Amino acid sequence: MSALEIHQIPVLSDNYVYLLRDVASGDTAVVDPSLSAPVLKAAADLGLRLTHVLNTHHHWDHTGGNLDIKDATGCKVVGALADADRIPGLDIALDDGEVFTLGASEAKVIMVPGHTSGHVAYWFQDASALFSGDTLFSLGCGRLFEGSAAQMWRSLRTLRELPDQTQVYCGHEYTLANAKFAISVDPDNEVLRTRLAEVEALRARRQPTVPSLMATERAANPFLRADDPALKARLGMGSADAARVFGEIRRRKDAF
């Protein structure tokens, strides 16, 4: 079984970048580097040898550091085949279901369109770690910039099937805002209320709320529960299909 060290780097106002070191080989990947300088400094401070950049999607705040990091380290840039023309410096283009290997660690590539048309997530099963970019947030999900509600709902349904112990490493520190919205549409959810109190306490201490557990997300994140009869009834959409319910929840969040 592989061992993966994960280092979290806050950048910009609310982004998270991740350094992933495969213990067996020392190979290290950086996930979604919006900026190069903090990544290169952190890698140097930790004594890490950068070998790969992993991009979940093409947005600048997830790819802005690609080329400088590649120039400085000679690393390979990995991203979605579907986004091959939009990922700066792309060397390795992967499709849904393919496996990316970092030393002895393996990540399954999962296509999750909705936020963008070429979005992927990386699931390191042995490490119980999911890097979900801007598809699944703690208690939220990404805006629908390039995909439909039906697409995003299918993507989120795929991710929610991952094991309970999966740790969700998303792209932004949005959890408190997401929690405040979630409680507005699902006020009787005890798991959500507990998570809201936990998130408020963490943010009061300026501590990260990421990663979160998939078990908690499945129970508390309204965007993963669009097919839950209780939530559908609360929204007055008891007979609607789940994709339509999801679209309504997303519409309400956009206006919240």
Image (cartoon, rainbow, N blue to C red):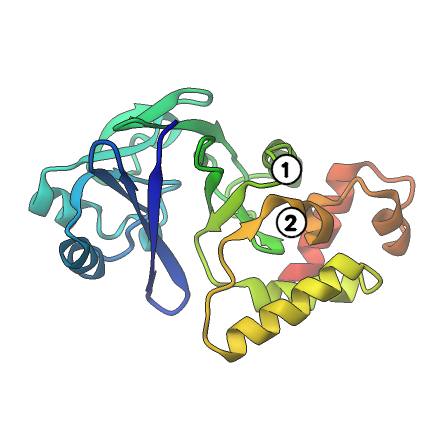
Q: Above or below — where is 8 with respect to 28?
A: below
Secondary structure beneath disc 1? Answer: helix
Q: Amino acid at mark 2?
A: Glu
List the residue tagged with mark 1: 160
Q: Above or below — where is 68 with respect to 149?
A: below
Q: Above or below — where is 109 with respect to 138?
A: above
Q: Residues within 10 Å of mark 2 (few under 14, many from 20)?
A: many
Q: Splitting the image into 4 quarters, where does residue 114 fall?
A: top right
Secondary structure beneath disc 2? Answer: helix
Image quarter (top left, top right, bottom left or bottom right) of the N terminus: top left
Q: Is residue 246 left or right of residue 117?
A: right
Expressed as whole percent of the image width and height from the top left, the position of residue 254 reads: 63, 60
Residue drawn 34% across the image and 26% down it:
100
Residue drawn 74% across the image and 45% down it:
225
Residue drawn 73% across the image and 38% down it:
243
Q: Amino acid at mark 1?
A: Arg
- State yes or no: discs 1 and 2 in contact (Cβ < 8 Å): yes
Expressed as whole percent of the image width and height from the top left, the position of residue 165 reads: 58, 41
List the residue tagged with mark 2: 217
Tell me if I can see residue 239 in this picture. Answer: yes
Expressed as whole percent of the image width and height from the top left, the position of residue 40 reads: 16, 55
Q: Splitting the image into 4 quarters, where does residue 192 fall?
A: bottom right
Q: Looking at the image, which is closer to me, 26 or 13?
A: 26
Residue 148 tag number = none
Expressed as whole percent of the image width and height from the top left, the position of residue 244 reads: 76, 41
> How far separated are the C-alphas under marks 1 and 2?
8 Å
Q: Is residue 151 left or right of residue 98?
A: right
**Count of marks placed on residues:** 2
Q: Looking at the image, which is closer to me, 32 or 124?
A: 124
